Image (cartoon, grey):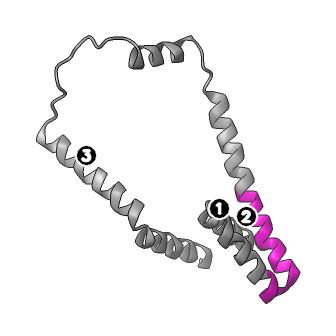
Amino acid sequence: MDLSILLAAFGLGVALGASPGPVQLLLFSEASRGGAGRGLRAMAGANATFGAMMLLLAAGLSSLEPGETFLRVVKVMYFDEPVDTRPIEARLDMRAVLSANGLAVLLLGLLPGGLMALCVRAIVQALAT
């Protein structure tokens, strides 16, 4: 069994999982170009990706038990008066790192095309080997 097709479908599902409109368009185009089998493989990859994401979400949420410690942290963070009211001061190197991180998040959030192209190229190279 050739796993590259399943891995490509899984990667495609990850890339397009957040926007359902292009997913249906892609499934339709795959089915029209390569027949029902190709469309079904693409759909299986998208469904497997969604299922894996839901499984990971359920596992992550089930590991967070809102016990006494968690509720105490929430109470201290939001409801108790602060013990130390001095302003937080950071050194210049920490400010530079946090500023660079904030700019990177802002740029990649507003203009994700370069990062997506890099990810697609990495997937294509990984599947070619």
Amino acid, disc 3: Leu
Q: Where does label 2 land, which residue?
A: 46
Expressed as whole percent of the image width and height from the top left, the position of residue 129 reads 59, 77
Work out whether mark 3 precedes mark 2 in sequence or the reverse, and give the earlier one.
Answer: 2
Label 1 crowd bin: few (<14), some (14–19), many (20+), radius 10 Å = some
Q: Position of residue 51 (x, y in %)?
A: 75, 52
Q: Which residue is mark 1?
A: 17
**Quadrant (top left, top right, bottom left, bottom right) of the N terminus:** bottom right
Image-based side of 111 in relation to 56, left or right = left
> Which is nearer the eye, 87 or 69?
87
Does residue 46 show up magenta in the picture?
Answer: yes
Q: Earlier in the sequence, mark 3 or mark 1?
A: 1
Quick one: 4 or 117, which is closer to the camera? 117
How packed mark 3 is, by other alpha carbons closer than 10 Å (few <14, some 14-19, many 20 or more), is few
The quadrant holding residue 38 is: bottom right
In magenta, the rendered stretch is 31-49
Kindly check if marks 3 and 1 are in contact, taking CB atoms under 8 A apart as contact: no
Q: Is residue 87 left or right of residue 2?
A: left
Task: Please tell me whether the stretch drawn in magenta is mainly helix, strand or loop.
Answer: helix
Q: Quadrant of residue 41?
A: bottom right
SS for tag 3? helix
Quick check: can you spot residue 103? Answer: yes
Residue 1 in view here = no
Cα separation, mark 2 vs mark 1, equals 7 Å
Spatial distance from mark 3 to mark 1, Cα to Cα? 30 Å
Secondary structure of the residue carrying numbered label 2: helix
Q: Earlier in the sequence, mark 2 or mark 1?
A: 1
Q: Which mark is residue 98?
A: 3
Q: Looking at the picture, which amino acid does disc 2 mark?
A: Ala
Residues under labels 3 and 2: Cα distance? 36 Å
